[in-house]
Image: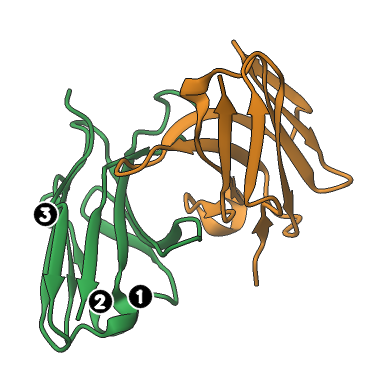
Amino acid sequence: DTGVSQDPRHKITKRGQNVTFRCDPISEHNRLYWYRQTLGQGPEFLTYFQNEAQLEKSRLLSDRFSAERPKGSFSTLEIQRTEQGDSAMYLCASSRPGQGAPYEQYFGPGTRLTVT
Amino acid sequence: DQQVKQNSPSLSVQEGRISILNCDYTNSMFDYFLWYKKYPAEGPTFLISISSIKDKNEDGRFTVFLNKSAKHLSLHIVPSQPGDSAVYFCAASARETSGSRLTFGEGTQLTVNP
């Protein structure tokens, strides 16, 4: 088990372009989360999947953001028409209820997005 | 609306001494609390957690204390080691109303000096 992986680790894009990030959770983890972290702040919740169902979305997830987990395994987060304010670290986490401490989420290394 | 606050952006302690990191929250619906540690270029790593039905949880050098009436929790590290130098995040969950989402504080940079 190699932990949560995210790809790419870094992404530089021009304003107005679309970007897509991928997250591969720990195998057998049925819950997957996306968070965003900006400089000097803690991670902020974006959205959460249980298997392939997207169960919760934050108001931070504007219409330009969409997340999918089509087969209940890996997930993608797409940002359309990027803006400079989208520059942040995008973190993915996964968990399996009943494994470890309740609500313990395992985080990936993150994808750092820079919008120029 | 910052529901979880870590008022100390940084803390510096000597190796072998106690490190105390503090966290305050405002949402009375929070019923589960966690501490994460983050090194540069890595994702947060889970350290220790506590349910609201307890006031203390201990795991090796790490102890978390919860004071529900004051809406305050703290993480004690004894003895502190240079490898503990990292950013520490406090996080909370309100299981009845917000499912599995975690609400994080801003983080405290701990530096342990040899």
Chain of the residue on which disc 3 is drawn: A
Give the labeled residue for mark 2: A65
Q: Secondary structure at mark 1?
A: loop
Tell me the quadrant of the picture where the N terminus of chain A can be found.
top left
| Left or right of B77, for residue A19 | left
State the residue at coordinates (77%, 34%): B66
Which disc is residue A61 wearing? 1
User: What is the three-letter code of the residue carrying label 1?
Assistant: Leu
- Colour of chain A in the rendered structure image: green
Q: How is the image coloured?
A: by chain
Contact flag, marks 1 and 3 (Cβ < 8 Å): no
Chain for numbered disc 1: A
Residue A109 located left or right of residue B28: left
Q: Position of residue B95 (x, y in %)?
A: 58, 48
Q: Kindly give the residue lying farthest to the top in the view shown.
A: B60
Residue at horizontal 55 percent and vertical 17 percent from the top: B81
Q: Does the CB distance between marks 2 and 3 fall below 8 Å?
A: no
